[in-house]
Amino acid sequence: MLRLLFFIGVGIGAGGVVVQLVGPPGAGDWTIAVSLTLIVGTSILMAVLRTARGISPASDADIAAARAAGRSAVARVDAIRQTGTLINDQPLCELDVTVLPQTGAAFRTTVRRIVKIVDVPRFQPGSIHSAVLLVPDGPEIALVDAPEETPAADASRIPPAAQAGPILRPEPGTVPMGGRRRRPFLGVGRRGRPVRFVLFAATALITAAAVVAPYHVAVGQSISALQEGRLHADLRSPEHLTAAVDAIAAEVGHRRLISVTVSADFISVTAPVRPGELASDSWMYRAGRVDHAGAAPSQPRSVAQEFGADEVSWEALWPVAEGAATDAGYANTDDMTLSVSRGVDSDIDSELFGQQTGPLRVVFSARDEYTSVFFDMLPDATGVERSG
């Protein structure tokens, strides 16, 4: 389970990196803390468990049950090694022992256990100890800390280590309990390793996909933009601009607008809360997401400032604007923006004179280090004129 949590953390981290690269500002910030917590926490716990692997802390009930089942034994220590790990300031040791069961042939195994410093002399090579077999058919044993219970006759019957065969080791990951081996949900040995690898990889991929899923539009846009040498889509391009306006209209709930500002990275829109009302809100489209910024800083003075999204040929605006700037000698159009709104009513006899209730216009400009030029055109991308 810890390994699954580790790879869930890896998936969250990988998905978070993708989201932070292609998503809007602030997207995926939470993934850093969650991913690091899972990866670091599970790594520490797995390291601790790996250090303690092989220790068989048999309970009194397990020892009593083994004796009642006739699984008593006597063991001779052939070698003792300190692993270099201290648990509660006591050394974790490996004991190579030769075991003579009450019934059956002698065998050799290795016992990992904490040996108190004061008890180290008791476990020197050649020392004899009572033991029990924790499972009937395996090398899992527990040394009983009562050497006086060991019959001397049994000690004399323990064969030399060379005659007891190779050292038998418990199956990795198993824990003897109640006379049976308890296996983990996911094994740790070589058997089943390819399946576990596939499971862990699938876990990481599914988790990463779940993190990225809310930003799938931004991911798709970035994949398309990479072919043009960009990380993010140019929202001024025909296919992205039309889709963005449709996405904004879907969030707003209608297709009536007050003003639209289009740049390469974001689109800012002011739209009435409800068609025909003065109260207006600001909306932002960036990296495939529409965000509601609340009330617009500048509220319209007349409902006549509204226009319909379908009155503008969105797909035609950028090609014409880019062409006009290029023809005017401005090759760098990366910073160009398009502004769509109604022009100022210049009819002095009109009740709306001086307000932005005139014909719908698209305004854009191009500049270099020394000069700049302004253009405007009709919403159908015709009638391009230099205005300054």
Image: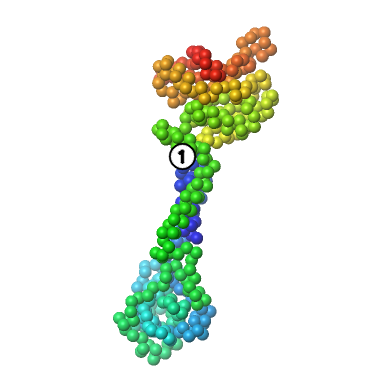
Q: Residue at x 60, y 27 (%)?
A: 270
Q: Circle 1 — which element?
A: helix
Q: Nearer the viewer, residue 324 or 143?
A: 324
Q: Residue at x 50, y 50 (%)?
A: 207
Q: Is residue 383 above or below residue 143?
A: above
For label 1, count other residues whose C-alpha is less than 10 Å away and answer few (under 14), some (14-19) or many (20+): some
Where does the image place residue 81, in percent across and percent down from the top left? 35, 73
Q: Is residue 347 above or below residue 95?
A: above
Where does the image place residue 128, in percent across and percent down from the top left? 38, 84
Q: Residue at x 50, y 64 (%)?
A: 185
Q: Is residue 122 above or below residue 52?
A: below
- Rendered image quadrant of residue 294: top right
As drawn, the residue found furthest toward the top would be 349
Left or right of 298 on screen, residue 105 = left
Give the amino acid type for the residue marked by disc 1 in the picture. Leu
Q: How many marks?
A: 1
Residue 41 appears in the rendering = no
Q: Residue at x 55, y 22 (%)?
A: 313
Q: Nearer the viewer, residue 37 or 187?
A: 187
Name the residue tied to disc 1. Answer: 21
Where does the image place residue 72, in percent across and percent down from the top left? 45, 84
